[in-house]
Image: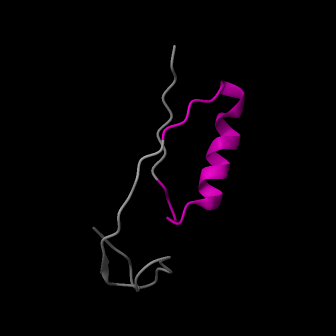
Amino acid sequence: MRRSLHCANPTIGSPGEWSKEPEIKIEVNVEDSWVEKTVVAVRKVHPYEEPLINIIRLE
């Protein structure tokens, strides 16, 4: 459950109010050369101002 700041512009809900929405986790495997482009693409389409993005290198 998230509460937006009064000055926020939430995609769902109203500023300053609690909102509980279903979420999903998406995992992708990309080559090193695609990491930056992938992060840019996620941020471009994600409704959160700061989406959670974890980058884990597979050796």
Residue 54 among magenta residues: no
Place of residue 33 in the rendered image (x, y in percent of width and height, measured from the top left): 72, 28
Image quadrant where residue 22 sits: bottom left
Q: Outermost residue toward the top? A: 59
The magenta-colored residue range is 27-51
Q: Residue at x 47, y 78 (%)?
A: 10
Q: Is residue 9 left or right of residue 6?
A: right
Residue 30 among magenta residues: yes
Q: What is the total number of numbered labels drawn onto the structure image?
A: 0
Place of residue 16 in the rendered image (x, y in percent of width and height, measured from the top left): 34, 84
Quadrant where the N terminus lies?
A: bottom left
Place of residue 37 in the rendered image (x, y in percent of width and height, measured from the top left): 70, 42
Place of residue 30 in the rendered image (x, y in percent of width and height, measured from the top left): 62, 30
Image quadrant where residue 17 sits: bottom left
Q: Residue at x 52, y 13 (%)?
A: 59
Q: How is the image coloured?
A: one colour
Q: Is residue 2 left or right of residue 13?
A: left
Q: Residue at x 64, y 35 (%)?
A: 35
Q: Is residue 9 above or below residue 32?
A: below
14, 50: nearer the viewer: 14
